[in-house]
Amino acid sequence: MIYLSHKPAAPLNRCVRVLWYARIPQTERRLERMLPTGCVQVILNLARDFLIDYPDREPARLTPPSLIVGARSVYEIVDTSDMADLIGIVFEPGGFAPSAADSADLFSNRNISLEDVWGAQARVLRDRLRQIPSPLARLEQLEGFLRLRFGGLIRRNRMVDFALERFGRAPGMSTVREVAKSTGWSERRFSQVFREEVGFSPKVWTRIQRFQRAVSQLHAGMDLPWAELAMECGYYDQSHFANEFRAFSGIDATTYCALRTQWANHVMAG
C-alpha cells in the first residue's frame, strides 16, 4: 500500500488543501461509507477507465474515470477497488469555485465528470499522469498542472474567509446572524454569497463542521461519556449529538467506533 499527501506551494495553497495519491493494487474489494466533510474533491482513476458509484438505494453504476466530487452533506458509498491507483485534489472551503468558473453549490452532493467542467485538458492530465511511474512525480505533475491552469484565477472572498474563520473556532458557538452582522451584510445576502462560494448555507456548513469535530475525537479514541463529547463538540445535548451524527453518517457513534478504518472519514459499510 502507498498513500502520499502533499500540500501545494503558495499561492495554490490558498485554494487547494492537499493533493493525495493512493495505490492499493491487491486490496480486498469491499464497500466503505465515506463521511461528509463539506469539501470539494477531484479524483482521477489511473488504473482503469471508470469509477464505481453507488447511488442512494440503487445498484452500482460505472462513471467516468475523472470526477468532481462536490461538497457533501450526506455520506456516500465507495468501492475500495477504485483505490488500486488513484490520485486526487481536496479543495479548501471556498477554493473550488474559481477553478470551475461557477458557483460551488451547483456541485454539492453531486458527482460530475471532470471533462464536463475542465474540458479536454482533464483527459490530457489523466493521460500524462498514467505515463508517470513515480507517485511523487505524479503529485508534482498534478501541482504543476493546477498552477499553470488556475494560478491566475486564484481569489478568495475576504468576507467568506472571515466567516469560515469565525465558524471554525467552535462550530455552533457563533450564530449565522452574529457573523453576518460582523461582515456588514444582511443575513440573506451573507448566506447567498457563502453558499455560492463554499457550497452550503452557513447553517449547514456549521453543522457539518460540528459533525467533523465529533468524528475527529471518536477516531482519535477519545474516551468521553457521550454527553460530555456532545458538549465538547458544540451540541446542545446528547440527543442532539446522536440525531445529528446519524443524519450525516447514517450510523450511530458506537457503530462508527466499531467500523472505523485508518482514515477518519472512511467506515466499513458492514
Image: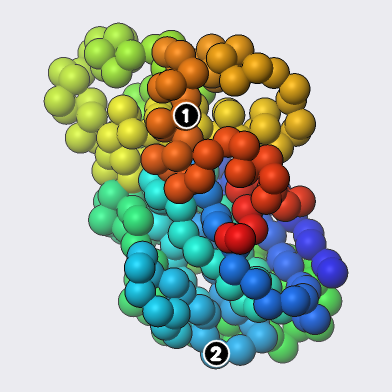
Q: Looking at the image, is mark 2 or mark 1 nearer the viewer?
A: 1
Query: Where is the C terminus found, in terms of image quarters?
Result: bottom right
Residue drawn at (68%, 77%), measured in percent from left and top? 29
Q: Dot 1: what SS? A: helix
> Is residue 186 toward the left or the right of residue 248 in the image?
left
- Image quarter of the N terminus: bottom right
Instruction: Give whichever of 196, 267 is nearer the camera.
Output: 267
Q: Using the rendered view, name the quadrant where residue 128 is placed.
A: bottom right
Query: Is residue 228 toward the left or the right of residue 122 in the image?
Result: right
Give me the disc on residue 36: none
**Can residue 12 be seen by looking at this rendering?**
no
Q: CA distance from mark 2 to mark 1?
A: 40 Å
Identify the residue position indicated by label 1 in the image: 242
* Residue 191 % position (x, y): 23, 29
Q: For the residue marked with disc 1, what is the amino acid?
A: Ala
Q: Amino acid at mark 2?
A: Asp
Q: Residue at x 44, y 80 (%)?
A: 60
* Dots 2, 1 in contact, CB < 8 A: no
Q: Earlier in the sequence, mark 2 or mark 1?
A: 2
Residue named by callout 2: 49
The answer to whether 118 is drawn above or below residue 208 in the figure is: below
